[in-house]
Image (tube, grey):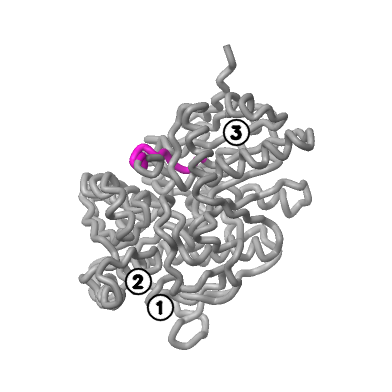
């Protein structure tokens, strides 16, 4: 009987601090700019949208930022998450590579998004905020934020990209279960939404449009704050619990990663997975850090590195990032969480400096990888996560061809139990 290698950390080994990669970078990031002046944006303007605690984390260069006890208490419901060696997949591929995956699908809402949702909900709660407004693509982020907000007696309004709103009804039901209010985007509720509906009443929507509607809503009142599920520094910071746990788990079995992979949309799960390995890369140990994205939305592989808005209407600050342009409307692929025109500024700069690399995958290849993984390893992955699986398979096959020993680690960022229509 083949050994099933599942590496578990004890509850007391849960990281007590998030890791801020900016502390170890040999360069500084370009500042966000005010879209009205093209000069660095003021804290006062950002405070109209975000709580002060979030802005403090966004600007921090401290290496370690303590995780509040209240957040640790909620993390303990599902963290630490397991690191599993994919021995069956290795055998099928006949590869000399060892393949490990970090399984974030054990979270209450089935994806890694809960890590930052709990952190952001608590920070807003601590500052007296009662309502959070957000966007969501495939619904993983909206579900996670609705769950997290319910833990602290708050409510959530989520603008969900219309193509996913129509094709992924179970995510809507999950958000409603936790008290969230879900609206298809573009909607008639905001000026920015109505603008996009003028051209097409059945507009498929995009994350950029949904972000515009969320910020539009926050700016029209003074009782709510905006909460973002990816892209900004504080979001990627909260996700570093993933990579920090991976490092500990590999040490427990005497392994050292040579390839670390995450799927890529805005950058949260990818950054959370690879950032704790960046210092090793900078020290010259040769670890490869790979972002796997869809060819239908090839932000890192075909985008331009320049300043652009994070939303479609131009409400957000201008961010220096790889972008396909705020006007870009991605095709209605099943990996709705990866349909974003831009990339996190931190991830973008690391790519520009050659510290990370990016690969793009066709939808047919990633779904084929997901089906194989489901039957061999017994977990049905989210369509987004399939990009990381496809990348791991490609690297394992390359190792077989070259007879190389590799230790490949990827983040299985969520399960696909609510995305079965994609496989159909």
Tell me: 113 left or right of 61. left
Magenta range is 412-420
In the rendered image, residue 191, in percent from the top left (x then y), is placed at 25, 77
Report which residue position mark 3 lands on.
Answer: 100
Q: Nearer the viewer, residue 181 or 244?
A: 181
Report which residue position mark 1 lands on.
Answer: 314
Q: Tell me, for residue 332, which label it has, or none.
A: none
Distance from disc 1 to disc 3, alpha carbons, whole Å, reads 41 Å
From this viewpoint, is residue 109 visible?
no
Crowding at mark 1 (Cα within 10 Å: few <14, some 14-19, many 20+):
some
Tell me: 391 left or right of 294. right
Q: Answer with mark 2 or mark 1, whichever residue precedes in sequence.
A: 2
Q: Residue drawn 51% across and 33% down?
A: 373
Q: Residue drawn 43% across and 86% down?
A: 36
Q: Is 419 one of the magenta-colored residues?
A: yes
- Mark 2 touches mark 1? (CB < 8 Å): yes
Distance from disc 2 to disc 1, alpha carbons, whole Å, reads 7 Å
Tell me: 20 left or right of 52. right
In the rendered image, residue 190, in percent from the top left (x then y), is placed at 24, 73
Report which residue position mark 2 lands on.
Answer: 212
Q: Residue drawn 70% across and 32% down?
A: 97
């Amino acid at each position: 009987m083949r050994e099933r290698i599942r590496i578990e950390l004890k509850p007391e080994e849960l990281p007590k601090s998030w890791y801020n990669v900016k502390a170890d970078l040999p360069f500084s990031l370009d500042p966000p700019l005010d879209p009205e002046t093209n000069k660095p944006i003021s804290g006062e303007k950002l405070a109209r949208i975000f709580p002060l605690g979030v802005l403090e984390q966004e600007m921090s260069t401290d290496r370690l930022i303590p995780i509040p006890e209240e957040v640790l208490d909620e993390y303990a419901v599902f963290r630490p998450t397991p690191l599993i060696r994919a021995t069956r997949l290795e055998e099928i591929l006949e590869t000399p590579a060892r393949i490990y995956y970090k399984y974030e699908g054990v979270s209450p809402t089935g994806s890694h998004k809960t890590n930052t949702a709990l952190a952001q909900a608590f920070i807003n709660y601590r500052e007296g905020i009662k309502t959070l407004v957000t966007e969501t693509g495939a619904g993983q982020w909206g579900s996670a934020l609705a769950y997290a907000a319910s833990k602290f007696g708050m409510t959530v309004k989520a603008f969900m990209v219309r193509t996913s709103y129509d094709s992924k009804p179970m995510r809507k039901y999950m958000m409603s279960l936790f008290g969230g209010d879900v609206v298809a985007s573009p909607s008639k509720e905001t000026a920015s939404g109505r603008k996009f509906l003028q051209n097409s009443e059945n507009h498929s929507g995009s994350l950029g449009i949904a972000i515009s509607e969320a910020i539009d809503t926050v700016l029209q009142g003074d009782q709510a704050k905006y909460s973002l599920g990816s892209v900004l520094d504080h979001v990627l910071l909260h996700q570093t619990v993933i990579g920090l746990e991976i490092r500990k788990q590999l040490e427990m079995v005497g392994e050292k990663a040579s390839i670390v992979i995450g799927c890529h949309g805005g950058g949260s799960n990818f950054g959370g997975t690879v950032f704790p390995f960046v210092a090793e890369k900078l020290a010259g140990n040769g670890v490869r850090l790979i972002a796997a994205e869809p060819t239908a939305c090839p932000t890192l592989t075909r985008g331009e590195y320049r300043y652009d808005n994070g939303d479609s209407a131009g409400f957000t600050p201008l961010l220096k990032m790889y972008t396909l342009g705020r006007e870009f409307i991605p095709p209605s692929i099943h990996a709705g969480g990866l349909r974003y025109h831009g990339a996190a500024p931190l991830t973008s700069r690391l790519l520009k400096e050659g510290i990370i690399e990016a690969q793009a995958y066709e939808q047919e290849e990633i779904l084929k990888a997901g089906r194989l993984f489901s039957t061999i390893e017994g977990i049905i992955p989210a369509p987004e996560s399939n990009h990381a699986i496809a990348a791991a398979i490609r690297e394992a096959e390359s190792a077989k061809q070259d007879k190389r020993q590799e230790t490949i680690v990827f983040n299985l960022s969520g399960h696909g139990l609510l995305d079965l229509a994609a496989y159909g």
